[in-house]
Image (cartoon, helix red, strand yellow):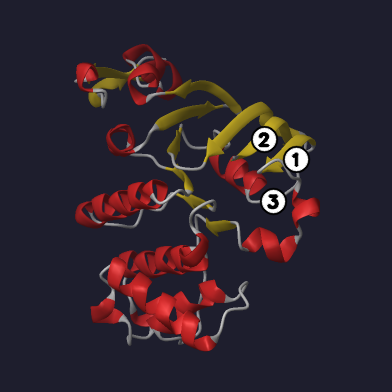
Amino acid sequence: MSIELSGGVVRSDGVTLLDRVDFSAGQGEVVAVIGPNGAGKTTLMRVLANEIPASSGRLLIDGETPPQIGREELARRVAVLPQRSVLDFPFRVHEVIGMGRIPHRTSSFENRKIVQEVIDSLALAPIIDRVYTTLSGGERQRVQIARVICQLWDCREGGYFLFDEPTAPLDLAHQVAFLETARSLAADGAGVLLVIHDINLATRFADRIAILSQGRIVSDGKPVDVVTREAIESVYGIRVDVIDQASGAPTVRVLGSRTR
């Protein structure tokens, strides 16, 4: 079972944002999408989340199209963390996390139980009674991640989590903690797709890496096969060295000046 885009094309104002993209993310795996700014990563995420339509191509979720699934059921299968989450009302942290339960028809008791389980799992207990708008940027991101996980917590086996740059506002410790959580979700049977800029973290935590450049998937596979010196220099236009490939989790070292 998978979430799959075939022949995806997105055009806007005469610009091609995605160009004949074939991409999938299966249950039980963590898939990282990397690439330079403007490559089309967020556009790909939004198409996979059924937030914007592709100009052409087909999106299937477990073999069904979004209209076949229906909006309410889709929200019980796919949870999305956008690149930016805007919330300017003075909700308490536990209330924001609880918003993830909106698509479900579970009882208030069950919802509170799930919220608490997510809070405990993500070590958010010290801030659950804080007002969301008083939190730092990194703390807000941790709360939004918790909200997304809460959405599928009781049905994560068979669900799909789409995270767009989830680690960007986080300090190093919380970046690692999030990626460990992503691996745990995949181990529970969820499909986890994330856009990430830190290639070295991606190689250590992702089962697959896809490189997106100029709206096209230029490479997709195991980290050791995808993250090569030639590929990174070609896509990012900088000089690099790639080491530790024998470990299966290659490390990229930036050497400096641009190659083009």
The amino acid pointed to by label 3 is: Asn
Q: Residue at x 80, y 53 (%)?
A: 67
Q: How many numbered discs, if any?
A: 3
Circle 2 Cα neighbour tier, 10 Å, few/some/many (<14 / 14–19 / ≥20): many
Q: Marks 1 and 3, Cα distance to the nearest angstrom?
A: 9 Å
Q: Is mark 3 on a helix, strand or loop?
A: loop
User: Residue 17, percent across and down?
Assistant: 66, 35
Residue linked to disc 1? 54
Q: Give x and y (percent) for residue 193.
A: 48, 44
**Residue that numbered label 3 is attached to:** 50
| Nearest the eye: 258 or 233 | 233
* Disc 3 from disc 2: Cα separation: 11 Å
Q: Earlier in the sequence, mark 2 or mark 1?
A: 2
The quadrant of the image that shows the N terminus is top right
- Please rate how many residues cluster around mark 1, counting C-alpha atoms within 10 Å: few if below 14, some from 14 to 19, many from 20: many
Give how far across and how far down residue 168 sits, in percent.
Answer: 36, 52
Residue 61, percent from left and from top: 67, 45
The mark that comes first in sequence, 3 or 2, is 2
* Vertical position of residue 102 compared to residue 257: above or below: below
Pointer 2: what residue?
A: 5
**In the rendered view, does 16 fall on the left or right side of 152?**
right
Q: Looking at the image, which residue is at 45% across and 48% down? A: 189
* Dots 3, 2 in contact, CB < 8 A: no
Do tag 2 and tag 1 residues touch (Cβ < 8 Å)? yes
Amino acid found under the numbered disc labelled 1: Ala
Indicate the amino acid at tag 2.
Leu
Look at the numbered disc 2 and give the secondary structure of its residue.
Answer: strand
Q: In the drawing, does residue 140 fall left or right of residue 42?
A: left
Residue contact between numbered discs 1 and 3, judged by CB atoms under 8 Å: no
Q: In this view, does 101 lie to the left or right of 165?
A: right
Residue 199 seen anywhere in this rendered image of the structure = yes
Q: Is mark 1 on a helix, strand or loop?
A: loop
